[in-house]
Image (tube, grey):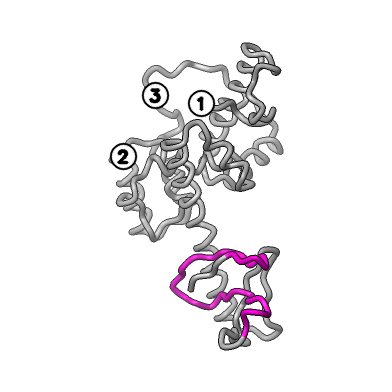
């Protein structure tokens, strides 16, 4: 199945194994392309689900939608990586033009850079890869292979990683010792939800968010606001920021 975005606002979907989601075809294009009554139709603002839909069809549609969402993390990560490599002076303009959030894309791109295409496990989710992205390549491969062989969920992989690390995490070479910070449970849960939504581990999400905030503060202190390029908004990193 290939769905394309048209002038009428149809939602873009990409090839999936079970062609059960169909595009809501504009009236002028209808005719021989009539969807079957049991098909779920995708639009830019939601799903059109038939009044009578079997459980098997409903479940199959869910798997297909989940595949699109998970794959899109890789697609967006690769897209931003290419833009940063080839259009260093204009890629943020492209992000704004596409109506995307830079911080989320940055997280996707960080994971995508850690895994070249041949090392990505199609049977595992983007979140599986994000859980091990900070590890050396050999350890990444070992943990992902184990997760695939044992059919681990992301949560199970995360638990296994924590157990393997032990109670005291190993401090990377050159890492600075920081005083522990007590965080209220509701705030931690809020951060954790944001990290899961971004497809990265919470520690990486916290570090990335703090880095971005620090960059904005430092830029404001060093460079007067009136000296910044007009294309840079106050809530986005300056061009050239990592």
Instruction: Mark 1 or mark 3: name the one nearer the start of the chain.
Output: 3
For mark 1, what is the residue?
240
Circle 2 Cα neighbour tier, 10 Å, few/some/many (<14 / 14–19 / ≥20): few
Point out residue 179 in the picture as x, y percentages from the top left corner.
57, 17
Point out residue 196 in the picture as x, y percentages from the top left corner.
57, 46
Q: Which-is-in-front pick, marks 1 and 3?
A: 1
Q: Nearer the viewer, residue 221 or 164?
A: 221
> Does the magenta stretch mainly form a helix, a strand or a loop?
loop
Return the residue found at the far left.
138
Instruction: Mark 3 or mark 2: name the one nearer the start of the chain.
Output: 2
Point out residue 60 in the picture as x, y percentages from the top left corner.
53, 75
Q: Which-is-in-front pick, marks 1 and 2?
A: 1
Circle 3 Cα neighbour tier, 10 Å, few/some/many (<14 / 14–19 / ≥20): few
Quarter residue 190 falls in: top right
Span of residues in magenta: 5-30
Label 2 sits on a secondary structure element that is helix
For mark 2, what is the residue?
137
For mark 3, what is the residue?
172
Q: Which residue is drawn at 62% across and 79% down?
A: 29
Tag of residue 38: none
Label 1 sits on a secondary structure element that is loop
Q: Residue at x 46, y 68 (%)?
A: 15
In the rendered view, tell whether residue 42 sits above or below residue 238: below
């Amino acid at each position: 199945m290939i769905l394309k975005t048209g002038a009428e606002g149809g939602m873009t979907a990409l090839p999936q194994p079970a062609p059960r989601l169909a595009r809501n075809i504009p009236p002028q294009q209808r005719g021989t392309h009539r969807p079957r009554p049991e098909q779920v139709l995708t639009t830019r603002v939601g799903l059109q689900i038939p009044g009578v839909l079997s459980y098997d069809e409903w479940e199959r549609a869910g798997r297909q939608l989940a595949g699109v969402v998970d794959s899109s993390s890789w697609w967006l990560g690769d897209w931003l990586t290419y833009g940063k490599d080839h259009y260093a002076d204009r890629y943020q303009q492209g992000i704004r033009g596409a109506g995307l959030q830079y911080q989320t894309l940055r997280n996707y791109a960080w994971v995508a850079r850690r895994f070249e295409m041949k090392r990505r496990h199609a049977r595992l989710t983007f979140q599986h890869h994000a859980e091990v992205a900070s590890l050396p390549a050999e350890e990444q491969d070992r943990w992902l292979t184990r997760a695939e062989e044992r059919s681990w969920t992301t949560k199970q992989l995360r638990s296994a990683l924590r157990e393997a690390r032990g109670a005291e995490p190993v401090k990377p070479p050159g890492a600075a010792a920081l005083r522990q910070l007590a965080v209220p449970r509701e705030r931690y849960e809020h951060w954790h939800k944001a990290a899961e939504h971004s497809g990265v581990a919470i520690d990486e999400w916290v570090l990335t968010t703090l880095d971005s905030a620090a960059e904005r503060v430092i830029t404001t202190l060093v460079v007067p606001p009136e000296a910044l390029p007009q294309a840079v908004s106050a809530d986005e990193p300056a061009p050239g920021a990592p």
